[in-house]
Amino acid sequence: MRLQPETIRLGVREWLVRPLTLRQVQEIEPILMSSAAETKGNVAAAMAIVAIALGRDHAEAISSLGDIEATAPEIGTAMATVLRLGGFVETPARGDAGLGEV
């Protein structure tokens, strides 16, 4: 099944992001590998991953990404969306509840 675009939300901003290109997947992979070696979550890595996804259709958003008022859980959710769009994590089947969902 072909992935569909998804909306990334940070604070009051939102962007529709298409499934990632192979180039974007290649850019994200080393960030994930270095983050896997860390024992704690890494907001900087999450922001870098989101920036890569925004680069194709929303390049103007990248320079102000760090100035958006958003919480750590929001950046984590945005990163999870990007990872789904790149095929790094599976998209839940319809009817399957995700984390924090009922």
Image (cartoon, grey):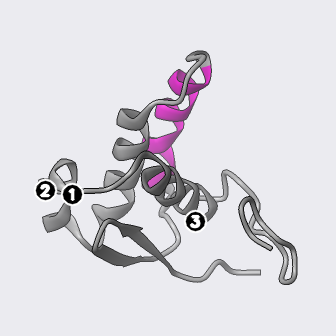
**In the structure shown, which secondary structural element does the residue marked by tag 2 occupy?**
loop
How many C-alpha atoms fall within 10 Å of the one at disc 3: few (<14), some, or many (≥20)? many
For discs 2 and 3, the disc positioned in front in the rendered view:
2
Residue type highlighted by circle 1: Ile
CA–CA distance in space, label 1 to label 2: 7 Å
Q: Position of residue 77 (x, y in %)?
A: 53, 58
**In the structure shown, which secondary structural element does the residue marked by tag 1 occupy?**
loop
Segment colored magenta: 23-36
Residue 68 numbered tag: 1
Residue 98 numbered tag: none
The residue at 87%/82% (across/down) is 95
- Mark 3 vs 1, N-terminal side: 1
CA–CA distance in space, label 3 to label 1: 22 Å
Q: Position of residue 60 (x, y in %)?
A: 13, 66
Residue type highlighted by circle 3: Leu
- Mark 2 vs 3, N-terminal side: 2
Residue 64 numbered tag: 2
> Would residue 1 be found to the left or right of residue 74 on screen?
right
Would residue 31 be counted in the magenta stretch? yes
Q: Position of residue 55 (x, y in %)?
A: 28, 61
Q: Position of residue 87 (x, y in %)?
A: 66, 58
For discs 3 and 1, the disc positioned in front in the rendered view:
1
The residue at 31%/53% (across/down) is 51
For discs 1 and 2, the disc positioned in front in the rendered view:
1
The residue at 59%/83% (across/down) is 4
Would residue 40 be counted in the magenta stretch? no
CA–CA distance in space, label 2 to label 3: 22 Å
Mark 1 vs 2: CB contact within 8 A:
yes
Which residue is identified by label 3?
85
